[in-house]
Image (cartoon, rainbow, N blue to C red):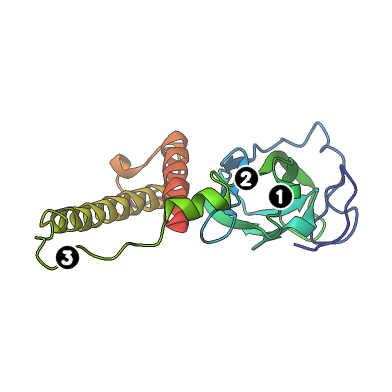
Amino acid sequence: MRRGAPQDQELVGPGAPGRGSRGAPPPSVPVIPVLVFPPDLVFRADQRSGPRQLLTLYNPTGAALRFRVLSTAPAKYTVFDAEGYVKPQSCIDIVIRHVSPIPSHYDVQDRFRIELSEEGAEGRVVGRKDITSVLRAPAYPLELQEQCNPVPHPGPPSWTAPPTARHLPEKSHSQLATSSFLLFLLTGTVSVAILLLPLQDELGSQLPQILHVSMGQKLVAAYILGLLTMVFLRT
């Protein structure tokens, strides 16, 4: 995303100035719904990997669409893949990172705008959606975080028997992590498979009719896939 010094309500993004700020499409042009998840972005200043969020954009139409991400505060964010194309009946993940998590930016609402346009250099804007973004302060101040992790005390005397029950939870935690990973992997595989299956009313498919899915099933699969991707990015 191109950075600069935006005005209070100005949406700034990559591309030529004024190119993404056109009026609404003519009444004869059907407005395409912009399906994004999550509906708003909440960044945490104490996130270990840095304040970042994953935005999933889904294209339910049968034609490729060009997308573009604009922001009212481009100097505070870095958007990976701020513009590009979404294939028909596919989704794309957009990573947004907050690059200025300072106290003066806590609880300040910014806006992102997702614009969809027809394929081509001069494609008309056929859909747009605004989402809010806010940076939350750490759950605990730094002083309290240091108190929650005190310096370890010396070990007990040599004649004191050490506790033996501490080794049991480690094995159970390892088994739980492995089972959770396998469950997430299976769920993600099923979601991707559903997105690749043809629609119920699609003609010319060589797959049997029982393997055709509805648009609602594809939306649910894209929603679940976005949740799983957010979980993997936060761990």
> Which of the two labelled residues, at mark 3 and mark 1, occupies the earlier sequence position?
1
Dot 3, crowdedness within 10 Å: few (<14), some or many (≥20)? few
Q: Residue 189 at what x, y percent from top left?
A: 33, 54
Q: Quadrant of residue 37?
A: top right
Q: Nearer the viewer, residue 152 or 137?
A: 152
Q: Could you say whether the residue bearing mark 1 is in a helix, strand or loop?
A: helix
Q: Residue at x 88, y 52 (%)?
A: 6
Q: Are marks 3 and 2 in contact (CB under 8 Å)?
A: no
**Which residue in the structure is indicated by mark 2?**
137
Which amino acid, mark 3?
Pro
Dot 1, crowdedness within 10 Å: few (<14), some or many (≥20)? few
Q: Nearer the viewer, residue 67 or 147?
A: 147
**Which residue in the structure is indicated by mark 1?**
103
Q: Nearer the viewer, mark 3 or mark 2?
A: 3
Q: Nearer the viewer, mark 3 or mark 1?
A: 3
Which amino acid, mark 1?
Pro
Q: Could you say whether the residue bearing mark 3 is in a helix, strand or loop?
A: loop
Q: Could you say whether the residue bearing mark 2 is in a helix, strand or loop?
A: loop
Q: Residue 84 at what x, y percent from top left?
A: 67, 61
Dot 2, crowdedness within 10 Å: few (<14), some or many (≥20)? some
C-alpha span from label 2 to label 1: 7 Å
Q: Are marks 2 and 1 in contact (CB under 8 Å)?
A: yes
